[in-house]
């Protein structure tokens, strides 16, 4: 059941479609668990042995879920800087070798040039305009240590199943695409990520795609991303759709989301896809 209670947004004038409140924190953590399950729990993809004195950067850290996972896998003498444009979801008590800071990925500190052995960034499809991706990748290249690695993860909306072949999926995806067009977002950013990484100057670029199951047929457990996917349609997207007149009424929209859930529950292989890309800055 959708709620009309207002959500907290870090900046109501920003292009970012998603809120920055505790409810969004729960959604992000559930989504992270589902994504990690889809890749067998793999936290780091590139061949980068992190050793004493190395530094890691986690961009768009959100709740810090990836940072906290990595922190238990590396020596405590490896430092992690975790940044986000919004500080509202940062963990209250981070590990001693982790520092959470408020920064935009488009303007990281000048003194960070060439500092990080590993740079991680995920899920900015709802945050960066199409023309900002080049600047983003340039910033990540700048702060990566020569010989160091960047690791990226982004959603691929066009590869979602069901796609446009079912009526409620088609209707709600159409609203999402309209919102993306209004905000200047790139719904194909997952597919475009590999080429953008190469264009930024990274070498040894590799990519893989994982599929996150949704609906009843995905079964119970962290692998099922129904909650994290569906709550976007019933939460943030609902607010934006009503605010911009992209649906006739709350009743019409809520009926569509109920129909969407039924489509997910009855369609084999219902999933949403994510692309992982990693590359190395030349020595």
Image: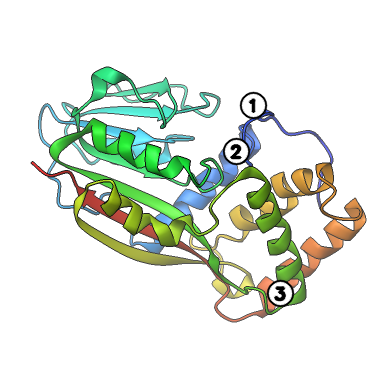
Vertical placement of 193 versus 53: above or below?
below
Between 65 and 167, which is closer to the camera in this rendering?
167
Percent of width and height locating residue 27: 59, 46
Q: Residues within 10 Å of mark 1 (few under 14, many from 20)?
A: few
- Residue for badge 3: 263
Vertical placement of 279 versus 17: above or below?
below
- Residue for badge 1: 11
- Asked whether disc 1 touches disc 3, contact meaning CB atoms under 8 Å apart, the reply is no
Q: Is residue 54 left or right of residue 26?
A: left
Q: Residues within 10 Å of mark 2 (few under 14, many from 20)?
A: some
Distance of mark 1 from mark 2, alpha carbons? 8 Å
Distance of mark 1 from mark 3, alpha carbons? 34 Å
Residue 16 — which label? Answer: 2
Between 259 and 12, which is closer to the camera in this rendering?
12
Distance of mark 3 from mark 2, alpha carbons? 28 Å
Residue 100 — which label? Answer: none
Q: Which residue shows up at 86% across the image and 63% down it? A: 255
Tag 2 secondary structure? loop
Which of the 4 quarters of the picture holds residue 40? bottom left
Mark nearest the camera among 1 and 3 is 1
- Asked whether disc 1 touches disc 2, contact meaning CB atoms under 8 Å apart, the reply is yes
Percent of width and height locating residue 221: 52, 61
Q: Which residue shows up at 66% across the image and 72% down it? A: 264
Comes first in the chain, label 1 or label 3: 1
Tag 1 secondary structure? loop
């Amino acid at each position: 059941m959708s709620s009309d209670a207002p959500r907290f947004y870090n900046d109501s004038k920003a292009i970012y479609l998603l809120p920055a409140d505790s409810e969004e924190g729960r959604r992000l953590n559930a989504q992270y668990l589902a994504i990690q399950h889809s890749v067998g729990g793999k936290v780091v993809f590139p061949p980068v042995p992190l050793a004493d004195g190395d530094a890691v950067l986690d961009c768009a850290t959100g709740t810090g879920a990836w940072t906290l996972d990595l922190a238990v896998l590396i020596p405590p003498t490896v430092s992690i800087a975790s940044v986000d444009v919004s500080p509202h979801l940062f963990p209250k008590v981070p590990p001693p070798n982790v520092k959470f800071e408020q920064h935009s990925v488009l303007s990281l500190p000048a003194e960070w040039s060439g500092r990080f052995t590993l740079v991680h960034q995920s899920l900015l499809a709802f945050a960066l305009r199409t023309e900002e991706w080049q600047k983003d990748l340039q910033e990540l290249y700048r702060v990566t240590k020569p010989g160091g690695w960047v690791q990226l993860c982004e959603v691929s909306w066009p590869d979602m199943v069901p796609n446009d072949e079912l009526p409620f999926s088609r209707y709600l995806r159409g609203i999402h695409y309209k919102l993306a067009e209004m905000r200047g977002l790139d719904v194909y950013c997952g597919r475009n990520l590999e080429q953008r990484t190469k264009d930024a100057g990274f070498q040894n670029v590799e990519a893989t795609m994982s599929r996150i199951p949704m609906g009843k047929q995905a079964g119970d457990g962290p692998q099922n991303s129904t909650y994290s996917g569906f709550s976007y349609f019933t939460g943030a997207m609902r607010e934006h759709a009503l605010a911009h007149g992209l649906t006739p009424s709350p009743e019409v929209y809520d009926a569509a989301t109920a129909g969407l859930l039924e489509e997910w529950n009855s369609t084999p292989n219902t999933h949403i896809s994510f692309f992982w890309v990693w590359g190395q800055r030349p020595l």
